[in-house]
Image (cartoon, rainbow, N blue to C red):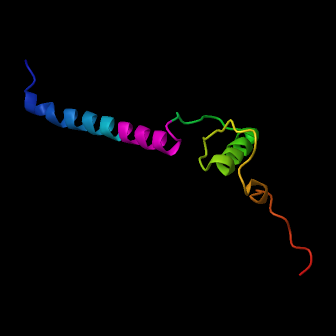
């Protein structure tokens, strides 16, 4: 006995919505990472280097081949110093 095509329309809508949602999330992740694929299983060293790259280039995943740091990089220290005396 054949299945009427009207019964398959909701399934097609559901599959299409899952596809649109997946493609949208993938596009957002790619846009947030500067056009690169998302990273998996980051350890502390990777996070430190990504923070350094963000301070150097302005992007979390950006990298530069310049030998010298840009002006103001020495003042952009991620380590916060405690104020001992006021």
Q: In this view, does 38 lie to the left or right of 24?
A: right
For the C terminus, the image quarter is: bottom right
Q: In this view, does 36 lie to the left or right of 14?
A: right
Residue 63 occupies quadrant = top right
Residue 16 occupies quadrant = top left
Residue 57 percent across, percent down from the top left: 63, 47
Residue 10 percent across, percent down from the top left: 18, 37
Residue 80 percent across, percent down from the top left: 80, 63
Name, please, the residue furthest toward the top. Answer: 1
Q: In this view, does 42 lie to the left or right of 26?
A: right
Name, please, the residue furthest toward the bottom. Answer: 86
Between 14 and 56, the one lying in front of the other is: 56
Q: Is residue 80 left or right of residue 47?
A: right
Rendered view: 10 above or below 80: above
Answer whether residue 28 is magenta in the image.
Answer: yes
The mark total stands at 0
Between 65 and 4, the one lying in front of the other is: 65
For the N terminus, the image quarter is: top left
Rendered view: 71 above or below 28: below
Say which residue appears at 75% left-offset and 42% top-offset. 44
Between 56 and 50, the one lying in front of the other is: 56
Say which residue appears at 32% left-offset and 34% top-offset. 19
Residue range corresponding to the magenta coloring: 22-35
Answer whether residue 5 is magenta in the image.
Answer: no
Say which residue appears at 60% left-offset and 34% top-offset. 40
| Principal secondary structure, stretch drawn in magenta | helix
Residue 43 occupies quadrant = top right
Residue 22 percent across, percent down from the top left: 38, 37
């Amino acid at each position: 006995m054949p299945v009427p095509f009207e019964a398959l329309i909701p399934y097609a809508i559901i599959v299409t919505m899952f596809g649109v949602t997946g493609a949208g999330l993938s596009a957002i992740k790619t846009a947030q990472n500067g056009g690169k694929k998302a990273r998996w299983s980051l350890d502390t060293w990777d996070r430190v280097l990504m923070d350094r790259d963000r301070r150097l280039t302005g992007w979390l995943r950006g990298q530069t081949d310049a030998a010298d740091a840009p002006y103001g990089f020495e003042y952009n220290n991620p380590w916060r110093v405690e104020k001992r005396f006021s």
